[in-house]
C-alpha cells in the first residue's frame, strides 16, 4: 500500500472540461482566481484523419476505449460507453446553440407530472449568461424568425452562413405547409479575420471533431484562451472520490490514467462538471449523498430527450454539392399544434440534419441493413425530432459496488424508459417530419430512434425545495458548503432544444457565484494545505451504499 500525495491547494477545482467545466472555469478566471481543471481524457488530435468516416465520435478511441456503463433498460445493448476528451462532447457536436424558451422555465403540468420539478429562477435571470455564452462561442444566428424565440438583449455575434441548396429545398417545403423554418444558431467560425481557419462547409461536422478547428467547440474556442490566462489543466486524470468532512469537500482523490498513480487535490471550492451521468456517479461513489436533504433524488429524474431521425430517401441526390446543411429549425410544434390533439401540451422541435456518413450508417443500422443502405446513403437527408421528455423518478443511475473498473470505481448502472407521453410526442413529430420531407421530394422513409445519452440531463437537479432538489439555485450541492455542479445534471426539465447553451449559461452563472463567495471569504480553510494519507487497496463503498441496487421498473 502506497502513500497518496496531496497537491497544492487551489481556489477552484473543476472536474470535467466540457461546456459546464470550461464555462465555470472561465467565470472564476475572470475573477482572478487560481483554477485547476482535471479531465479524464486527452486532447483530440486535429487533422485530415477527422474527415475520414471512422472519425465519427462513437468510433474514436475517446469513446471506444472508455469503461462502459451497464444499462438495465434504455439502450440498444447492455452497455454504453462515455466520451472522455478535452472539451467533452462539444468536440463532436454539430454546433447547435439554442436557448430554452421563456415558457420552459415554468414547465406545464403535462411535462412535470408528479416529479416536483421546478426551476428556482426564470428565463430573465439566465438571459445575460446566455448572451455571454453566445459571445464566447461565437454563435452565428438570425433573430426574429423563430416563432418561439425568447427575449434577447443582444444580437448574435455572427450572421449565419448562406443556405445550402438542400436546406433551401427543406425551407421551401416547410413554408408551403404553413410552417416557419428558421436558421439554427450554430457555434461555427465563418469569418477568417482572426487567424483561425473559417468553416469550409464540409460534411464531417455533426458527430466529428473539426479537422481545421473552425467549429467553436470548447477545446478550440474556449480552453486555449483560458490556458493563456493562467488556467491549469491536467489531462488523463480521473476523479475517484470526493472527500467530505464537516459539511465541506476537503479533498478530491484522483488517479492518473492509465498508470493509476493516486493523489489528492485540494481547493477552496469544487465544481463538478463531468456530465449528467459521470457527476452523479462520482457523488454516489463518494457516499456524499448522505449529506444532502434530497439525497434520495440523487441520480434520479434522468432525461435525455425522446429523439429520432427521420431520413427521407430521394429519387435524386438531395445534396450533390456535398455541403454541410444542418441549418434549419422548426418550432411550430414546440408548445403543441392544432393538428395534434394528443398528447396535449408541449411536443418538441424539428431540426434539419445532414446526410449521414456511411461509417455511421453501417455502425447504427440493424445487422445486414447497413451494407444494403451503403449505395443509397447519398440519396438520404434527414430531420431530427426532439420530443420534450418527462422527468421520471424511476429513470436513474446507481452504482454497483460488486463490479469495479480498473481504478476501483464502482460501475455506473443506468435505467431509463420513456413514458407513453414521451413516445406519443415523438410519434407526432415524426409524422410532421415525414410530411415536410415528402413535400421536399422524398418518396421513402427510414426512422432511426436514438438511444444514446448525448442529451442526458437531470440527475442532480436544481430547485427551491431542499427536500426534492439536491442543488440550490446557484448549483450548490445542498449539505456541502463548497461543492457545486455545473453540467447538464442540474436541469429539472429539459425543454426540447439541445442542452449545450443552457449548460454553458448555467455554468457561467454558477462560476460567477462561486467567485463572489470565495472573494468574500479570502481566508483559506482551516485544514492544512499539505497532508498525506494512506490509501486502502481499493475504494470502499460507503455504508449507506453497500446494499445492491434493485432494478427499477418503468415504461420503455
Image (tube, rainbow, N blue to C red):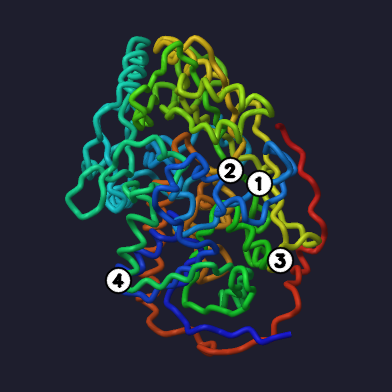
Q: Which residue is mark 3?
A: 406
Q: Secondary structure at mark 1?
A: strand
Label 2, on which residue?
Answer: 453
Q: Find residue 353 and report its horizontal and vertical position in percent.
A: 43, 29
Q: Which residue is pictured at 67% across the width and 38% down the height? A: 75
Q: Residue tagged by mark 4?
A: 229
Label 4, residues with CA under 10 Å away: few <14, some 14-19, many ≥20: few
Label 4 to label 1, Cα distance in Å? 36 Å
User: Which comes before the other along the chain, label 4 or label 1?
Assistant: 1
Mark 3 or mark 4, which is nearer to you?
A: 3
Q: Are marks 2 and 3 in contact (CB under 8 Å)?
A: no
Q: CA distance from mark 3 to mark 4?
A: 35 Å
Q: Residue at 63% x, 70% y: name it.
A: 241
- Circle nearer the N terminus (2, 3): 3
Task: Give the residue at mark 1.
Answer: 80
Q: Relative to residue 237, is residue 165 drawn left or right?
A: left
Density class for disc 3 (Cα within 10 Å; few <14, some 14-19, many ≥20) is few
Query: How far apart, in angstroms, are the residues tagged by discs 2 and 4?
Result: 33 Å
Q: Nearer the viewer, mark 1 or mark 2?
A: 1
Would you say 278 lies left or right of 132 here?
A: right
**Residue plotted at (29% across, 44% down):** 139
User: Does dot 4 land on a helix, a strand or a loop?
Assistant: loop
- Distance from the alpha carbon under mark 1 to that under mark 2: 9 Å
Residue sitting nearer the eye, 188 or 535 = 188
Instruction: Say what secondary structure mark 2 lies in.
Output: loop
**Image quarter in which the C terminus is found:** top right
Amino acid at each position: 500500500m502506497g502513500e497518496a500525495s496531496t497537491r497544492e491547494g487551489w481556489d477552484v477545482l473543476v472536474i470535467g472540461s466540457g461546456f459546464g467545466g470550461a464555462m465555470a472555469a472561465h467565470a472564476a478566471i475572470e475573477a482572478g482566481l487560481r483554477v485547476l481543471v482535471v479531465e479524464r481524457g486527452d486532447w483530440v488530435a486535429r487533422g485530415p484523419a477527422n474527415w475520414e468516416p471512422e472519425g465519427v465520435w462513437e468510433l474514436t478511441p475517446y469513446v471506444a476505449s472508455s469503461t462502459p456503463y451497464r444499462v438495465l433498460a434504455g439502450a440498444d445493448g447492455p452497455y454504453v460507453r462515455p466520451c472522455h476528451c478535452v472539451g467533452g462532447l462539444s468536440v463532436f457536436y454539430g454546433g447547435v446553440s439554442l436557448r430554452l424558451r421563456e415558457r420552459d422555465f415554468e414547465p406545464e403540468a403535462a411535462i412535470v407530472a408528479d416529479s416536483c420539478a421546478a426551476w428556482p429562477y426564470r428565463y430573465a435571470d439566465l438571459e445575460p449568461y446566455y448572451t455571454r455564452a453566445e459571445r464566447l462561442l461565437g454563435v452565428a444566428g438570425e433573430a426574429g424568425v423563430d416563432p418561439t424565440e425568447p427575449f434577447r438583449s443582444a444580437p448574435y455575434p455572427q450572421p449565419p452562413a448562406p443556405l445550402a441548396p438542400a436546406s433551401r429545398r427543406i425551407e421551401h417545403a416547410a413554408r408551403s405547409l404553413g410552417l416557419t423554418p428558421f436558421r439554427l444558431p450554430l457555434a461555427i467560425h465563418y469569418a477568417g479575420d482572426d487567424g483561425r481557419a473559417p468553416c469550409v462547409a464540409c460534411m464531417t461536422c455533426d458527430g466529428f471533431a473539426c479537422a481545421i478547428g473552425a467549429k467553436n467547440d470548447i477545446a478550440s474556442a474556449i480552453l486555449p484562451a483560458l490556458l493563456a490566462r493562467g488556467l491549469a489543466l491536467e489531462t488523463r486524470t480521473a476523479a475517484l472520490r470526493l472527500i467530505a468532512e464537516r459539511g465541506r469537500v476537503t479533498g478530491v482523490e484522483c488517479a492518473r490514467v492509465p498508470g493509476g498513480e493516486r493523489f489528492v487535490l485540494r481547493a477552496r471550492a469544487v465544481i463538478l462538471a463531468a456530465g449528467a451521468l459521470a457527476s452523479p456517479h462520482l457523488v454516489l461513489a463518494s457516499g456524499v449523498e448522505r449529506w444532502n436533504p434530497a439525497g434520495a433524488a440523487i441520480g434520479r429524474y434522468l432525461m435525455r430527450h425522446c429523439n429520432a431521425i427521420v431520413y427521407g430517401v430521394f429519387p435524386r441526390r438531395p445534396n450533390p454539392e456535398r455541403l454541410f446543411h444542418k441549418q434549419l429549425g422548426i418550432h411550430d410544434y414546440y408548445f403543441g399544434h392544432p393538428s395534434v390533439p394528443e398528447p396535449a401540451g408541449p411536443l418538441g422541435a424539428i431540426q434539419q440534419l445532414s446526410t449521414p456518413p456511411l461509417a455511421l450508417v453501417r455502425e447504427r443500422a440493424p445487422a445486414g441493413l447497413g451494407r444494403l443502405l451503403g449505395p443509397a446513403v447519398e440519396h438520404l437527408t434527414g430531420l431530427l425530432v426532439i420530443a420534450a421528455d418527462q422527468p421520471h423518478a424511476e429513470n436513474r443511475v446507481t452504482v454497483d459496488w460488486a463490479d469495479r473498473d480498473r481504478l476501483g470505481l464502482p460501475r455506473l448502472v443506468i435505467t431509463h424508459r420513456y413514458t407513453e407521453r414521451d413516445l406519443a410526442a415523438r410519434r407526432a413529430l415524426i409524422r410532421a417530419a415525414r410530411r415536410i420531407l415528402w413535400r421536399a421530394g422524398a418518396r421513402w422513409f427510414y426512422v432511426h430512434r436514438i438511444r444514446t445519452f448525448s442529451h442526458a440531463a437531470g440527475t442532480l437537479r436544481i430547485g427551491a425545495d431542499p427536500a426534492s432538489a439536491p442543488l440550490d439555485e446557484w448549483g450548490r450541492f445542498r449539505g456541502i458548503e463548497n461543492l457545486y455542479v455545473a453540467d447538464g445534471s442540474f436541469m429539472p426539465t429539459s425543454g426540447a432544444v439541445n442542452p449545450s447553451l443552457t449548460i454553458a449559461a448555467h455554468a457561467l452563472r454558477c462560476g460567477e457565484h462561486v467567485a463572489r463567495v470565495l472573494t468574500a471569504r479570502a481566508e483559506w480553510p482551516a485544514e492544512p494545505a499539505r497532508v498525506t494519507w494512506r490509501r486502502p487497496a481499493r475504494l470502499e463503498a460507503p455504508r449507506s451504499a453497500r446494499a445492491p441496487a434493485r432494478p427499477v421498473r418503468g415504461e420503455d
